[in-house]
Image (cartoon, coloured by chain):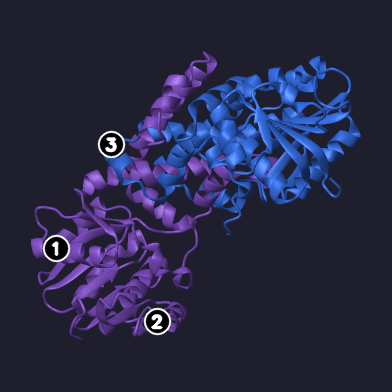
Chain colours: A blue, B purple
Amino acid sequence: MTGAMFERVGIAGLGLIGTSFGLALRARGLAGRVIGVDRDAAAITVARGRGAVDEGAADYAVLEGADLVIVAVPPQAVVDAALRAAGPARRGAVLFDVASVKAPIVRALEAALPEGVRFVGGHPMAGTERQGAAAADAALLTGRPFLITPTARSDADAVDVVWNLARGLGMRPLLLDPDVHDAIVAQVSHVPYLLAAAAVNAADDVALGLGGPAFESLRRMAGSPVELWVEICSQNRSAILRSLGWVRDELDRLEAALNEDALGGLLAAARRRAGGGG
Amino acid sequence: MTGAMFERVGIAGLGLIGTSFGLALRARGLAGRVIGVDRDAAAITVARGRGAVDEGAADYAVLEGADLVIVAVPPQAVVDAALRAAGPARRGAVLFDVASVKAPIVRALEAALPEGVRFVGGHPMAGTERQGAAAADAALLTGRPFLITPTARSDADAVDVVWNLARGLGMRPLLLDPDVHDAIVAQVSHVPYLLAAAAVNAADDVALGLGGPAFESLRRMAGSPVELWVEICSQNRSAILRSLGWVRDELDRLEAALNEDALGGLLAAARRRAGGGG
């Protein structure tokens, strides 16, 4: 497969993100062959039908000889899936996951993965409130940040491989320490989701029926798959609690300022930080 | 002007919303003539150049003979602008405002407006983080809720006129008591804005630089014009404080559930309420 960045790419987990990677790799001609693994035969059928994978199976043995493995299963299943994929993969294969919590996964895999598979933590910041192979879309990845979380134990060439893949897919790679990653993602993703869930749970039925542009954004966030968020929140609990505490401190300040009719300064600061101008 | 719903429409305040109404009225052929009032000559020039108004002036006398007046100035200037517009308008003219807080404005105008002008409180739920005549867009209104807040003192025919205008503009009219309106809008608009401001103010610089889809929604909200929000929050303070309290109670529940690894129920409720499926 001359010209392709990878000869044989394995994707473990043909959900929204895994299948989107398959579509994007194929659309950009970066993979000679793409092989999917999923215990759900229907997901494989959809992913094949959409051209995201050439073949797929429930058994990890199908990843035999893969030079790149993308582990795109739910966060709490990542470690197990990575260990299963490591066996059949080619010696020296690069393996990355896509979970939005990194430190616990990176720590577990660096301790457990066999030599010969070069693991790098990854987190493509993409998604929608929909899920599954049918909702996958190569465009979901385009222009998005691809956070890569190497450690002192990571293979530098493998980090380069993931970086170049991100670039090749039109994403914006960024290197972050795993713990820093988890703290930041708590702020920009996990806590915003919890704020949205709180706003939706607090809204009465008339408000829910009405909507409006601001509320629709929150509603979209709160409409995301629950199982995934339960796992994310469990894995990143301490960073989320810390970040939620900061937001609550800010809410205290806003509430006090509201009572004193002195909101201007705090709102102007938010607007400046948001890049919305003076 | 046969066929037009109104012969002569006055728009006081050629900002984002006022100018968007002018564009929409013209695009749909609902007004024979559209007259703008703004103390800012540049806004008039832009609105005329874009075809939102036929003519404009700083002096309310230009509204002579208007059969419909749209008061689209900032919330705290609505009462004064409505009183100024009432003089030159035709006897029996319908006048509505577009502020997102209704009870204080409705109460003040029902007490102060001269007979012969039929006032109805209005709130088209449309907007962007941009502002001014240059950012106006007829499409901003299409499909949006148009909340109308009549009271026992409102003229029923005037309410019909505003309802039919909303329909004619492709909006979704809904009648609400002014106090109910303010309570609901606190939930779906004002408190979401404050949550966004809190999240942005709590975020560190790396998080701000990173973004991601959830955070970008909050950032857009927090980037809205501050002056407008200061007025809105001041006018709707008690409803906002109440609604913010409910959201904080929900955050307490989420935090407790996070600590106990028992988030599933609360998140599933939010997803159901958000219409996001099981």
Pick whichever, A5 or B63, lies toward us. A5
**For residue B240, what is the image quadrant?**
top left
The disc placed on residue B1 is none
Residue that mark 1 sits on: B160
As drawn, is A187 to the left or to the right of B274?
right
Real-space Cα separation, disc 3 to disc 2, in angstroms? 40 Å
Q: Position of residue B17 (x, y in %)?
A: 38, 66
Q: Is residue A190 visible?
A: no
Sequence-wise first label, 2 or 1 = 2
Q: Is residue A54 visible?
A: yes
Q: Point out the image quarter for the C terminus of chain A.
A: bottom right
Residue that mark 3 sits on: A205
**Amino acid under disc 2:** Gly
Pick whichever, A202 or A80, lies toward us. A80
Q: Residue at x 20, y 86 (%)?
A: B1
Residue that mark 2 sits on: B51
